[in-house]
Image (tube, rainbow, N blue to C red):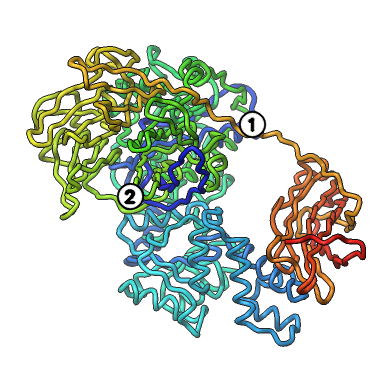
Amino acid sequence: MALRLLVAPSFTSRTQPKSFPICPPLSSHLHPTCFLFCYSRSTSSLSSLLQWRREALVFSRQRRSTTTACLKLEEKNASETGNEWGKVSAVLFDMDGVLCNSEEPSRMAAVDVFAEMGVEVTTEDFIPFTGTGGVASVKGVKGFNTEAAKKRFFEIYLDKYAKPNSGIGFPGAFELITQCKENGLKVAVASSADRIKVDANLAAAGIPLSMFDAIVSADAFQNLKPAPDIFLAASNSLNIPPSECIVIEDALAGVQAAKAAQMRCIAVTTTLSEETLKEAGPSLIRKEIGSVSLPDILSGGGSSGCHNEMQGPQNINSLTQTSSELLKERTDSGSIQDTNSSNDNVLLIGGGTAPVVPEFPAKLDWLNTAPLQFRRFTVVGVHSAKFDNEKDLEAIRNAVLRYNVTHPVVNDGDMYLWRELGVNSWPTFAIVGPNGKLIAQISGEGRRKDLDDLVEAAILFYGEKKILDNTPIPLTLEKDNDPRLLTSPLKFPGKLEVDVVNNRLFISDSNHNRIVVTDLDGNFIVQIGSTGEQGLQDGTFEDATFNRPQGLAYNPKKNLLYVADTENHALSATSTSFAQPSGISIFPDLKELYVADSESSSIRALDLKTGGTRLLAGGDMVFSDNLFKFGDQDGIAPEVLFQHPLGVLCGNDSQIYIADSFNHKIKKLDPASKRVVTLAGTGHAGFKDGTALAAQLSEPSGIVEAGNGRLLIADTNNSIIRYLDLNKKDAELLTLELKGVLPPSPKSRSLKRLRRRSSVDTQIITVDGGSSTEGNLYLKLSVPEGYHFSKEARSKFNVDIEPENTIIIEPLDGNLSTEGSAVFHFRRSSPSAAMGRINCKVYYCKEDEVCLYQSLVFEVPFREEVPESTPAEITLPYIVKPKVSTSKFVL
């Protein structure tokens, strides 16, 4: 999750939030074994099946497997890779083209630099060179100042192309770095870019600097790649010999530098072709960093694997094989053979020995669909529970609703299919062919590419045999039939926080992706994130977006509200003694922090002075890694049992209050005696107000103290806020009425931009847009001698397109540079002719006199597209000249 920082709202506050990372992502409550079934009938439509597959493969349990289903067999190239590859202790990542998709934006920024000098260049001109000096030399730029150009380049690049969290990271980069660190490897960035660009690119990619053990940039070196200096410095900084370092590069110079440093190198084809890279002789070549697996790094693609008792499996080589290569290895009765790259927890079943997957037992409960049999292609989430509460159909329905699961789910409460298929970890994916036989079984997270390759090959193979059916599965989604989601303004609220002094309650309305602020009596004040849309966007309270926010913490001294923005997945170190810390609260004396450790079902205390932890109640007192000691038992530790507690509160009375989520109770722990008693709830999920011990909750997850003897509770599955009144002899659990709180109002996705009416004095300039599929538009405005563009009132632009959806021009709006320029990229979404209009409001001033305004419209007619045309480079020039009758515009 990411931590978001908000200025806590008063009645009029509209301060912009910021973001920074703090915690790892939380796991969901679903424990699926995912089955991907290729169902058989007479006809097939490959495109429909592929589309269905891509939608279905999104579902995955966010849990790291502790055991894997794997096997140990002979591998053809084992002697060539595993034995000769040698020890690996560190991975050195190049940045541009490897971690960050920043090569093209960098070249575009360089184009902007030259455009300001009046020199017309293209992004392709920069491909052979590092920096701008080479292009300046080729173009014959006289008096070219390298340092000044570099300074201006960074100004443009940072302001325009590398804003934080702008998404320039390559898919899979973050995950591979994480896997390397989890497997004890040191990681470093070793880049020929300056440190300012390294920091900016990593921030733009959403990769924290703290993930790396070392960052080595070009600033301190005279000899850059292909010289080995940068890689050798990284090796020295990590205290790892060069022979134990693996370099991941995209450029010829980088591969050559790795070889010069006597390091092995994995090259990726994000910038250059495989044929070009082969000239430098890398150890391995992969398509992109998302295609590089941990076994590629550790053994050059080899894998020793481990034992598995199932018979008939084939070992897995590389999922980078094409589907046609996979299909050549098939027999009519067999399954796909020889497929995976990545690690030892993929089980591929081959030939006639593949086991037949049993039918679903007739009495299982289904969600999102009527009971299925093996007749179509679909994805089924087979729910195999860990906690007792998770076996309950209503609990699973709540999880399906909370995590917006839209594929069929079946409750395998007795773990029948789990046992039949030898599954031993969450999540596990089983791919089943139309003959009912198991094609492959994959365990663990981060396996999307493996699944993509296997399913695509299976669909191609069985599609050619005309034995697949593309008839859609009839779905009846749970979210369309749940009355709670229609009546409550909240949707699975997660956590609460209070500002007692200012009479405010903060609610993380998790599935509405917003923070709701009311007074302590439930009267609406303001909301942060008004549309309910998922995202990671700073801005005003109306524009800011979250992705299932959870934990909240309020700093009264600074009037700041901290938000744990769960699904935006920023990471930092977490103590390994906690299986999954879900709620924290500090003791009034500020000496200890109390933690609800949900996966071990325990309450722990953290000494803020020494950093040591101790178990207070619940869990296993002897074996702290035992995640299966849970239940519902009051008493004195160690006899106390919880079941997945999510919320904890250190009260002003020095008692610890606990939201025991899967037991549907609120409990109290006396830290002195370690006695635990139930305050509210019956142990059964439901909704009922009244005397606390007779009232019902459904998976409460947040709890705060509101003063006056009241505890406020986020009753998550009931999508409401409850309060426990402890003032009475017989405490009562009641519902807090939220007055004036409405569900979020999503932005319309079909808003049409109205064509702007030009004023009488608007100057219209027409420039032919050509017929290319894509290209760049370079807007270049200039003013007469003695005039300059206003720095106080920035000149602006916005773009109109007619007809809509025929062409994409980016950006759609923004400010012109202080030199009057802007760069736009266009690409066709339809071959039809289109009209692009760039509307400009230009503010310019005469030295020490008046400031003037000019309205301009550049009309760019795009002709019908010519396929396979070269990218267009189109200049939109104009000299802004003052009119004699122009009125003064006072700034």
Front-most of residues 331 and 210:
210
Between disc 1 and disc 2, whose residue precedes? 1
Q: Quadrant where the N terminus lies?
A: top left
Q: What's the residue type where badge 2 is placed?
A: Gly
Q: Please state the horizontal and vertical placement of residue 764, each as a whole percent of the image.
A: 89, 55
Taking the image as shown, residue 58 lies to the left or right of residue 358, namely right
Taking the image as shown, residue 728 lies to the left or right of residue 833, namely left
Front-most of residues 74 and 272:
272
Badge 1 local density, few (<14 within 10 Å), some, or many (20+)? few
Q: Quadrant of residue 786?
A: bottom right
Q: Quadrant of residue 718?
A: top left
| In the rendered image, the vertical position of residue 243 relative to residue 406, given as above or below | below
Taking the image as shown, residue 209 lies to the left or right of residue 724, namely right
Numbered label attached to residue 305:
2
Q: What's the residue type where badge 1 is placed?
A: Ser
Is label 2 in a helix, a strand or a loop?
A: loop
Numbered label attached to residue 48:
1
Is label 1 in a helix, a strand or a loop?
A: helix
Could you tell me which residue is drawn at 22 percent across and 31 percent down?
657
